[in-house]
Amino acid sequence: MKWLVAIPVYNEERYLPGVLDAVRRYARDILVIDDGSTDATPALLQLQPGVRTLTHPENRGYGQSVIEALAYADRHGYDWVVTMDCDEQHEPGRIPHFLAAAAREDADVISGSRYLRSFPDDDEAPPDRRAINETINRLLEQVLGLRLTDSFCGFKAHRVAAMRRLALDEPGYAFPLQFWVQCVRAGLRMRELPVRRIYRDSSREFGGTLDDPAARLLHYLAVFVRELQRDPLVPLNRPAWMACPCVLHE
């Protein structure tokens, strides 16, 4: 199994060196997508030997970075791509767990969940983020029949061949809303894997109007509705695996 770790970054000078040092313990092939950073991130990346880099001349959005990571993995013959953030919210030590789950060959998307089970040193999630996550979880179940406990975790393993069946083009933070709709429409198999809930910096912002939780939720809902309207989605005769929680037991 040939696999890649892909890390979208935007102004992560504080965390980048430490995260890459930790990822190297578990991964040989690492791709960083620099989404138009304006701090020292580009200079720090030049000091990282063996790390492949895609650079945006301007900020294009988290979703666009993930889309390009998936396309890169496809072009270079990878079987799986693990995406993770660069703000120390995702533990590189969990990478082998994602790969072990991928090796079971019973899933196309293995999605980290910060709420599937509790870890002794879990952090408290910001109340607005947890509330929006829970709202979207309920919406995905009611409309798509997809039962998730964490619809926004960016720590994921993606089967590259399955990603070819999707037509992803949502560039921003609402990317997961498009992603889940298209995964269900394509009949992909989704599973969740427990990961620690880590919030190093509670002051981190989304930027612009998305810093307002109500505006952020409305934006997510607009993207969800738009994606549903692309093609009629009839959530009938769903695969049997969708009838139960998407859980991977370790």
Image: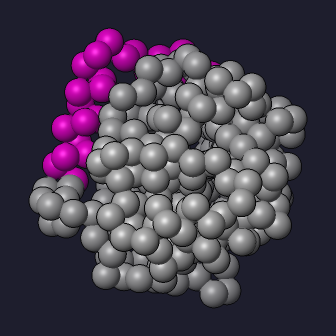
* Quadrant in which the C terminus appears: bottom right
Single out the residue that lies furthest toward the bottom: 121
Q: Position of residue 149 (x, y in %)?
A: 52, 55
200 w.r.t. 181: above or below? below
156 w.r.t. 121: above or below? above
Q: Nearer the viewer, residue 110 or 7?
A: 7
Q: Nearer the viewer, residue 96 or 42?
A: 42
Residue drawn at the location 51% of the way across and 44% of the way down: 54
121 w.r.t. 68: above or below? below
Residue drawn at the location 16% of the way across and 49% of the way down: 218
- Tell me if residue 221 is in the magenta stretch: yes
Residue drawn at the location 83% of the way across and 36% of the way down: 2
Count of marks overlaid on the render: 0
218 w.r.t. 186: above or below? below
Left or right? Give the position of 235 relative to 119: left
Q: Quadrant of residue 195?
A: bottom right
* Quadrant in which the N terminus appears: top right
Write the start and end of the magenta stretch as one range: 217-242
Q: Quadrant of residue 94?
A: bottom right
- Tell me if residue 79 is in the magenta stretch: no
Q: Is residue 117 visible?
A: no
Residue drawn at the location 31% of the way across and 81% of the way down: 203
Q: Position of residue 134 (x, y in %)?
A: 38, 59
Q: Is residue 50 visible?
A: yes
Q: Position of residue 146 (x, y in %)?
A: 50, 37
Q: Position of residue 102 (x, y in %)?
A: 79, 41
Q: How is the image coloured?
A: one colour
Q: Nearer the viewer, residue 129 or 118?
A: 129
